[in-house]
Image (spheres, grey):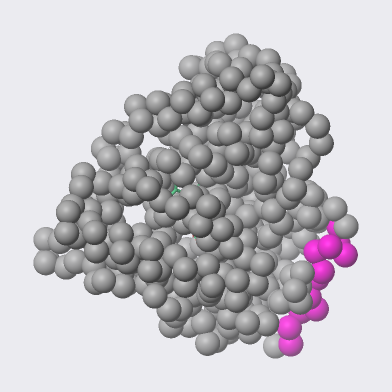
Amino acid sequence: MPDLPAVDLLALDPDFDADPYPAYAKLRAQGPVHHIRGGGGERFWLVVGHEACRAALTDPRLSRDWRRNGHLATGLAAPPATDGPGTAHMLLSDPPDHTRLRRLATREFTSRRVAALAPRIQEVTDGLLDVMLAAEDRRADLVDALAYPLRMTVICELLGIPDLDREAFRGWSDEIAAPASAAAARAAQAEAVPYLNALIAAKREAPGDDLLSALIHTVDEGGDRMSEDELLSMAFLLLLAGHESTVNFICKGIRALFAHPAQFALLRSDLDGLIDGAVEEMLRYDAPVETAPPRVATEPVEIGGSVVPVGGVVLIALADADRDPARFAWPTRFDIRRTEAGERGHIAFGHGVHFCLGAPLARMEGRIVFRTLLQRCPELALDGAQGERISGLLVRGERKIPVRW
Ligand code: HEM
């Protein structure tokens, strides 16, 4: 079957980079799958709409195992950086490899371990706000002052990394989440690998109370354990996977509150009662991860009457799925009481076997950071226009959020 003509998203909507939602909605009105052209000329198959996105996320013919199936991929100028050391992780595998790696990880990345981090997350948030609020000009960049260092400290505490080189880490995570090119992503990967190998060797010698030490030593009932490369890859995944998404979540959440003053005031009026619903609505309203990481079709896959051919690279628009009126009433309305009214089921953390392993941690961080920020900064306001943007179909966001109080 001949390919459908590829749609250029910027031609569909020149404001796509600043606000992709109208373009996604236009596409959704035409059907659930579209052949699209990315900024660099690549061709993807974009799935939109809640039902189709959920179905695609659980379709075993759409593979995340790029090491095994990447050679099938068509439409890309260069293959993504999904081979080499550090890539033998669960987000780049399909069942049964995925099942095995996820089972080993969940033995140690438990809800108890996450809950135990709460007091420390609170302490770090308080400390960062003490510093931020001491600024004489009563101005700060919320990303630099709060979202970024909080996120980094939390993941380092979880993994047991006391002295991470923060600048190097920022470079790697920026490149891996929103790579300027496949070559740049590979270079970042090549720099991060020796660092993580040394870290694992040190923890093998002197294990701590942390998640990485536990993963190094974990053995399941059948005697299975992770290989060296799998451990390196797991460390890589945990350190970098949830990084941009959590920072983006905090940035998008605060933007949503500022854009909806009545909801902002409502939340302030009953922080304890409404914070859980507010966090869920922030995740639904403006997805921190816009499209799930790409899948490659290992067989022809029919979605809503269109066929994604073998080798088609598929992007699943989580952001659009959660703005679908077939699933959420008045989906463009930001309503922190939506979950109270029974409207649950957003897929900001994905769906199916790859459902975000860090979701409980991300939710807890969100609850603590928004509650503390709103309690301690009743006068918080945006300070000037939107700053530098991160554009990319995977993660779209902002590098700075200037605020004053
Ligand atoms: C608000 C913040 C976050 C969002 C929106 C988010 C979103 C996602 C999504 C959409 C997926 C599924 C990707 C797919 O199906 O291809 C995913 C997977 C994953 N996330 Fe998160 N994430 C967040 C935070 C975190 C954190 C804090 C961690 C860990 C510290 C984390 C670790 C992971 C891991 C390990 C996977 C792979 C799971 C698997 O393949 O089985 N995430 N995340």
Residue 24 left/right relative to 164? right
At a point 38% along the width and 69% down the height, the residue shown is 194
At a point 76% along the width and 77% down the height, the residue shown is 41
State which quadrant residue 124 falls in: top left
State which quadrant residue 391 falls in: bottom right
At a point 86% along the width and 57% down the height, the residue shown is 13
In front: 218, or 213? 213
Magenta segment boundaries in residue numbering: 2-13
Q: Position of residue 330 (x, y in %)?
A: 72, 36
Q: Is residue 322 visible?
A: no
Does the magenta segment cover residue 33? no
Residue 14 left/right relative to 353? right
- Total of numbered circles in the picture? 0
Q: Quadrant of the N terminus?
A: bottom right
Q: Position of residue 290 (x, y in %)?
A: 63, 54
In front: 142, or 55? 142
Q: Is residue 80 visible?
A: yes
In the rendered view, tell whether residue 182 sits above or below residue 372.
below
Residue 379 left/right relative to 270? right
In the rendered view, tell whether residue 349 sits above or below residue 55.
above
Q: Position of residue 257 (x, y in %)?
A: 67, 28
In front: 306, or 224? 224
Q: Position of residue 276 (x, y in %)?
A: 49, 27
